[in-house]
Image: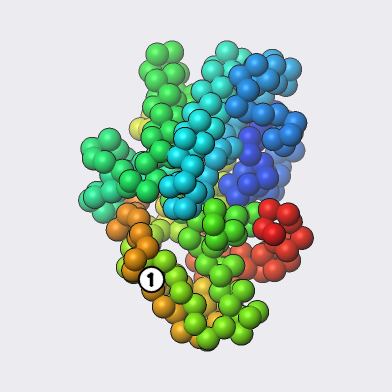
Amino acid sequence: MKMNKGDAIFVAGHTGLIGSAMVRCLRGTGFENLILKSHAELDLTDAFLVEQFFEQYSPKYVILAAGRVGGIIENQTSPADFMNANLAIQLNVLKAAHRTDVRKLILFASSCMYPRECPQPMVETALLSGYPEPTSLAYAVSKLAGMQMCLAYNQQYGEQRFIPVIPNSAFGPNDNFDPKSGHVLSSLIRRFHEAVQADSKLLTLWGSGNPRREFIHADDIANACISLLSGNTEALKLPLNIGTGVDFSIRELAEAIAKVIGYSGEIEWDISKPDGAPRKLLDSGRIRSFGWKPVVNFEEGLRSTYHWYLENAFNTEKYS
């Protein structure tokens, strides 16, 4: 069924990195009937409240961008919290969406679901072929469960309504810039900014700097998802990777961020700290065959993200 501009679309997690990009890009393409609820207004871990919400609002489309996310430190110190929150949100939303006949739902999985030692670039068929990176295992398992729930609903009921996507490391406005809980790119932006503010001549970063990562702007992810919501996806094999096809070493990333921010001091690498997976580059052939491709230039995306940080981060309690 064709997606209409007036159809009700529930964006779960609309204040986060990918959720806010979905709102921005949906509105930019003429979709205004968006249902947006903060965590205080709707606790997605509460099954009763989620059922009530879906019965009351009857969204036609759902973007499930809500969940517990974080970097290596949080993944290691709060694995049970990560599993509890993500499993509950996914189970509750998928069940309610099925009961209320949502036309399409997009669930965001994660590239950390892939085996730690995986042929590069990583194709979707490599999932479950090996053991994920231990430092993010709890999160990876919860996301694998959400992905498999989508596929299970599609298989059991004979309709490809639930679409799990696997974006690689996202960045952009509304990211989490806290070094203790954020991902590498946003954490480095804050670290380098603070180093410049303090006129520091030496900045020590975790790991060796050698692992390679693929980064994609949240707006590119959002536009990929809009094309999936509005297009005919019946013949697509699921899940779908969403990436740029280009990766950088963490050392190269740090140097690029230092250049954008204007840090001219020395960078030191603390090899006693964990690196994480050696490489995570996605094969995005499936979604590219659907007609999508990324358009945000990486360096321009870095500059705009830093500009957003300067304009917004210090006014938000989240980053204090």
Relative height, residue 226 to residue 247 (above, below): above
> Measured from the top left, where is residue 102 in percent x and y?
59, 21
Residue in the foreground of this view, choosing between 203 and 33:
203
Task: Locate the C terminus by quadrant.
Answer: bottom right
Q: Residue at x 44, y 25 (%)?
A: 150
Q: Is residue 10 left or right of residue 215?
A: right
The answer to whether residue 300 is visible is no
**Residue 260 quadrant:** bottom right
Q: Residue at x 29, y 38 (%)?
A: 127
Q: Residue at x 38, y 71 (%)?
A: 270
Residue in the foreground of this view, choosing between 226 and 106:
106
Task: Locate the N terminus by quadrant.
Answer: top right
> Measured from the top left, where is residue 89 in percent x and y?
56, 28
Label 1 Cα neighbours within 10 Å, binned few <14 / some 14-19 / many ≥20 = few
Mark 1 residue element:
strand
Q: Is residue 140 left or right of residue 190?
A: left
> Measured from the top left, where is residue 281 in percent x and y?
34, 55
Residue in the foreground of this view, choosing between 256 and 63:
256
Q: Residue at x 57, y 34 (%)?
A: 64
**Residue 60 quadrant:** top right
Which residue position is annotated with label 1? 270
> Measured from the top left, where is residue 15 in percent x and y?
68, 45
Relative height, residue 14 to residue 263 (above, below): above
Looking at the image, what colour scheme do you see?
A: rainbow
- Amino acid carrying label 1: it is Asp
